[in-house]
Structure formats: structure tokens, C-alpha cells
Amino acid sequence: MNSASESQYQTDTLLNSADETFSQDTRPNKRSYSVTNVKEDYLQTSAASKDIEPPARQIAFTKYFTYLTPTDRLLLIAGTVAAVLAGAILPSISLVMGNVAVAFSGGSTSGASITSQMSVIASIVMLIALSLFIFSYMFFAFWQHLAENITTDLRKRYIAALMHQEIGYFEVNKVEQIPA
């Protein structure tokens, strides 16, 4: 035998003898150890000893919009469109600033031509800034109003659910903890 196969044979023999020794369990339940059994035992004992809650279940993204009214949906759509437009307008300022550099280095040295080009560029910058302000204000105002509507609706549902509780619920739970 060459040295590689001899070392492999020794490793296999050692592993087999370790498996035989390890599987001979003297505990009363005669459970053999494996990686999955050890992992299950650890999880059971750690969960029982620490009272660990299981991780929260994830819900679908569309579930967030279940209780929206038609007005809320309109606010959401209009706010999203305004946000996209505001985001699309923002890079156009860089393009216009490129025109400023061209106006100064365009070869025309007359003050009147540079002034007329700069007044056109200033008008464009002012229109971009005005449209950016309007769309940014729209998306912020619409989403803020939508958030207020959702919060009001949640509070109404919470109070309605509290009013339908048995009187024993308020005896078991402290009154200070109910709003939280």
C-alpha cells in the first residue's frame, strides 16, 4: 500500500471505531447521537430554558394594503407617481449645469450672447426647481396624509377590539399596559 491509501485506511478505521463507540449509549432511552439529534436536543433545551419565542411569521407585501380605502389608494398612487417624477427631475439639474459650462466656453465672447444664454439657462433652472418643489411637496403631503389615515384607522380598530373584550380581560391585564 502506498502512503496515501494507508493514511486513508487508518482514517476510515478510526472513524468506524469512533462511530461504534459513540453509538453505544448507556443512557436509559438508548438514543444514538448524530448531528441532527444533538441539534434538536439543544434547540429543545434552550427553548425550554429561555422561553424563546419562535421568529415572527413574514407576511406578503400586499397584505399591508388590505384595509386601504379608495381614497387612500389614490393618495398612495399619486404620491408614488410624484415621488418618481421628483426623482427623475433631480438629475436634470446636472445636465443644465453642463450647458452653463458650454455657454462660457462656447467660443462666443460677446457679453450679450453669454447674457442671453444665461437667462435661458436660469429660466430652465427655475422651472426645474419649481417642478422639483411641487412634486416633492406632493409626494410628501400625500404620503403623510395616507400615514395619518392609516394611523387613525388602526386606532379606531384597536378601540373597537378593546370594547369587545370580556371584563375578565381587564382584570388579568393591567390598565397601564392596554394602550401599549
Image: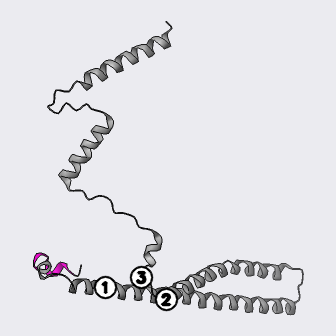
Left/right placement of residue 20 relative to residue 129 reads left
**Splitting the image into 4 quarters, where does residue 39 fall?**
top left
Residues drawn in magenta: 171-179
Say above or below: 11 vs 49: above
Residue 156 horizontal/vertical position (percent): 31, 88
In the image, what residue occupies the spot 40% across and 14% down?
A: 10
Sooner in the amino-acid sequence: mark 2 or mark 1: 2
Left/right placement of residue 33 relative to residue 7 reads left
**Splitting the image into 4 quarters, where does residue 146 fall?**
bottom left
- Name the colour scheme: one colour
Amino acid type of disc 2?
Pro
Residue 102 horizontal/vertical position (percent): 82, 79
Which residue is identified by label 3? 67
Which residue is identified by label 2? 70
Amino acid type of disc 3?
Tyr
Task: Judge the density around disc 3: few (<14), some (14-19), many (≥20) Cα neighbours within 10 Å.
Answer: few
Between residue 116 and residue 82, name the one nearer to us. Answer: 82
